Image (spheres, helix red, strand yellow):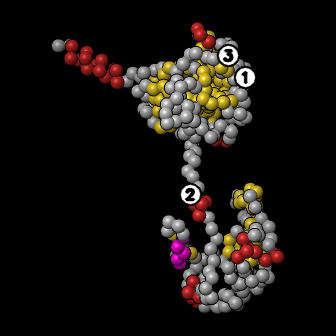
Amino acid sequence: MLKPALFALAALTSLGVAQSPLVTLNLGGNSGNVGGGLYFDLQINTTVTLTQLDIRTQTGAASTFMDIYLGPSTYVGNVTNPALWTLVSTTNPTTSLAGGLTTYVITSPFALGPGNYGVALKSNATSFSYTNGAGNNPPLTCGAVPGSCLNSIFSNAEMTLRAGAAQNAFLQGGIFSPRVINCRINYTPGGNPIAVASWQKYGGGCYNRARSFYEFWPSSVPFDFGTVTAGGSGITSMRLTFAGNRYLVTPGTTAMYTHSPGNVPLGLGDDVEQPIPLDPLSPTILFVNNGVPTNTAAAFMCSNGFLSLGASNAALVTLIPAVNPFLGSAPLFGNWHDLDPSQVGAETR
């Protein structure tokens, strides 16, 4: 009568047991510098809590420690930008194992939920020992994609490790690839996954279609800005809709904002420019000026229909708006009209 219950208990127990540790290689063959980095991608299939790493080091000493960083979903293309990586835990070495492996107990065990993670390990007072990637898995070139070498991918039910690369200086300098970490990843099932900010390269996106636009026909009266009471069309904003190879410009519904911070009228006259300081509590504006990232705490509004950041464009104030002078200068936004805000109902000339 007890046998079915025992079988059921055994089945339930087996469901909660992870296939820890995930084992890679223990061959050595190459090594980096003290303070260097070792990188690999980790695909998590079900939530696990990482508790210990057994790593092959050059010295095999148990008196050193190591830092663990997580970053984008892959290390590829991201190991020269430290800002993309977050230190999630350090380790305490406790035991030197046979074959050069050292047991590094994770001081603050952390859980990872299902997903893809780039992992960066930083050595301290010792150097990593690892194995060069070998073999080929057509049509991929060995090492061009993590795990594409015959000796660089390792899997069990909970995770897949795809190796890898190394640097002699952590997250800087030359990148050596393919390099395969020699380790055992120890973990337990379950846990509360940590929140990890991630970054994904998504291609050109809108930047490939970043364009200014203007009209070549004589009159744009149907699209003139301005309220009806002021003699305008009633249009106060524009809506841009991407149509595959161009943007369609149609009237928007957002109310026009014609005052500076503090609700103070700009009081612009004809052919003038006026600085508009940001609120002291507002962050500065970061923009690119001729390819150079620039911060500014002020904008400059010209009555001839353009807004610029960071610097006055007085040389353009008296010009009838034209495409080439505008695009060759610092103004960032414009509507291509010689405006005179002091003349109600006479927006263009």
For the C terminus, the image quarter is bottom right
Q: Position of residue 7 (x, y in %)?
A: 25, 17
- Label 2: few (<14), some (14–19) or many (≥20) C-alpha neighbours in 10 Å: few
In the picture, measured across the screen, residue 227 lies left or right of residue 244, that is right
Q: Nearer the viewer, mark 1 or mark 2?
A: 2
Residue type highlighted by circle 2: Gly
227 to 254, vertically: above or below: below
Q: Secondary structure at mark 2?
A: helix
For the N terminus, the image quarter is top left
N-term mark: 1 or 2 = 1
27 to 67, vertically: above or below: above
Residue that label 1 marks: 34
Q: Give the distance between the C-alpha atoms of the residues marked 2 and 3, in whole angstroms.
A: 45 Å
Residue that label 3 marks: 58
60 to 193, vertically: above or below: above
Q: Position of residue 110 (x, y in %)?
A: 53, 29
